[in-house]
């Protein structure tokens, strides 16, 4: 029966104020079951205050075969990092 | 024992949770899918957690030197006060969810009254349990609807489970001597008053699930008085084996 159920991606907000983060995936017949399953599989140890579920097939993912053209050009563009400024000591968390 | 009625009343509530928790626990690692397996085990652990709170309270009332483990594991079959419904076997997933739903509706109604008990400990345990049991009912009710209103096969299996389990529902509303005494003192719930609301709620959900509530059925009773069905002995053998073979073992 499991094989007939589509895959869902689960995002959990662990505390108010934080963003939802990807926690994992699971199988479920529809979004209501996905939410209940996510609650039981991913938040039973007090991990969350909010859950999103998204059908995995609704996610458009980048193709690993294109990693060269997508990501490698960024590797030698140091000037895109704001590391050339002198930050005053008073400014924290930069 | 000074508080014999209160002691028996607590066990009457706790034993339902213990035996249903044990039944669900049998499915750990055997659920139809990883997700439902974890869900069932979570519910089992909720129920056993509630059981512990009740038994710990019972040990304080008992004038004998007893631990919660003694109460859970070292009684004979006739001393367990759970209703027949919760000891029924995990015949198939439809039975597991049907049994759960038929119990959850009752359980939640009972706890919603028990939270106003004049006994502070019982009221506190009930308050904590309400959130857990609300979710149990949501989960089991969703599954009854899903299977009832699913394929031809799932509808037939869910209806079969409801037909077989229905006869155990009336006992939920029987009052034992301890129930009556505690209700009079304002510590316990008069469960006989929950009956009408229960059948109304359950019938409405069954209708939504395109299932039929059986009518004109003979009802089985006895669990509350310690007269259990043939399944109970096997369940207890499994559950008590460890404590009986290795007395006082802990882990």
Image: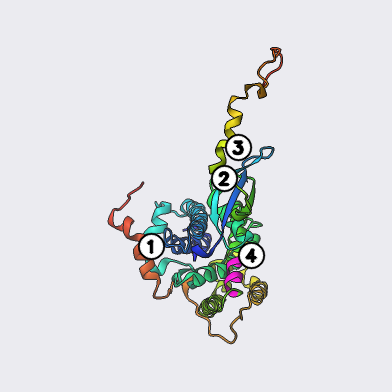
The answer to which of B96 and B247 lies nearer the viewer is B96
Q: Position of residue B126 (x, y in %)?
A: 60, 56
- The residue that label 3 is drawn on is A70
Distance between the alpha carbons at the discs numbered 4 and 3? 58 Å
Distance between the alpha carbons at the discs numbered 1 and 3? 68 Å
Please indicate whether residue A44 sits to the left or right of residue B64 in the image.
right
| Same chain letter for marks 1 and 4 | yes
**Disc marking residue A63:** 2
Distance between the alpha carbons at the discs numbered 4 and 2? 53 Å
The answer to which of B84 and A13 lies nearer the viewer is A13
Q: Residue at x 48, y 67 (%)?
A: B82
- The residue that label 1 is drawn on is B75
| Same chain letter for marks 4 and 3 | no
- The residue that label 4 is drawn on is B109
- Pointer 1: residues within 10 angstroms few (<14), some, or many (20+)? few
Distance between the alpha carbons at the discs numbered 2 and 3? 9 Å
Disc 3, SS: helix
Q: Residue at x 58, y 60 (%)?
A: B136
């Amino acid at each position: 029966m499991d094989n007939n159920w589509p895959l869902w991606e689960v995002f959990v907000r662990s505390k108010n104020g934080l963003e939802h983060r990807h926690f994992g995936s699971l199988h479920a017949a529809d979004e209501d079951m996905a939410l209940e399953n996510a609650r039981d599989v991913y938040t039973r140890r007090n991990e969350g205050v909010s859950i999103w579920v998204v059908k995995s097939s609704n996610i458009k993912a980048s193709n690993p075969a294109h990693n060269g053209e997508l990501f490698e050009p960024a590797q030698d563009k140091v000037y895109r990092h704001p590391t050339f400024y002198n930050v005053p000591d008073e400014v924290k968390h930069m | 024992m000074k508080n014999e009625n209160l002691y028996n009343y607590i066990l009457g509530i706790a034993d339902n949770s213990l035996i249903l928790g044990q039944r669900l626990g049998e499915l750990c690692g055997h659920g139809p899918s990883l997700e439902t397996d974890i869900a069932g085990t979570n519910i089992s652990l909720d129920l056993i957690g509630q059981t512990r709170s009740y038994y710990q309270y019972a040990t304080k009332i008992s004038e004998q030197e007893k631990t919660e483990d003694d109460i859970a594991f070292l009684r004979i079959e006739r001393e367990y006060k759970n209703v027949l419904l919760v000891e029924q076997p995990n015949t198939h997933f439809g039975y597991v969810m049907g049994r759960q739903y038929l119990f959850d509706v009752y359980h939640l109604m009972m706890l919603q009254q028990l939270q106003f008990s004049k006994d502070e400990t019982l009221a506190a345990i009930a308050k904590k349990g309400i959130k857990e049991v609300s979710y149990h009912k949501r989960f089991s009710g969703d599954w009854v609807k899903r299977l009832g209103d699913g394929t031809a096969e799932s509808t037939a299996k869910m209806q079969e489970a409801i037909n077989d389990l229905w006869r155990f529902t009336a006992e939920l509303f029987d009052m034992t001597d301890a129930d009556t005494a505690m209700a009079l003192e304002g510590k316990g719930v008069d469960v006989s008053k929950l009956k009408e609301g229960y059948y109304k709620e359950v019938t409405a959900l069954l209708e939504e699930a395109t299932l039929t509530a059986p009518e004109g059925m003979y009802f089985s009773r006895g669990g509350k008085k310690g007269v259990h069905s043939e399944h109970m002995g096997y369940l207890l053998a499994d559950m008590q084996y460890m404590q009986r073979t290795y007395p006082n073992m802990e882990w």
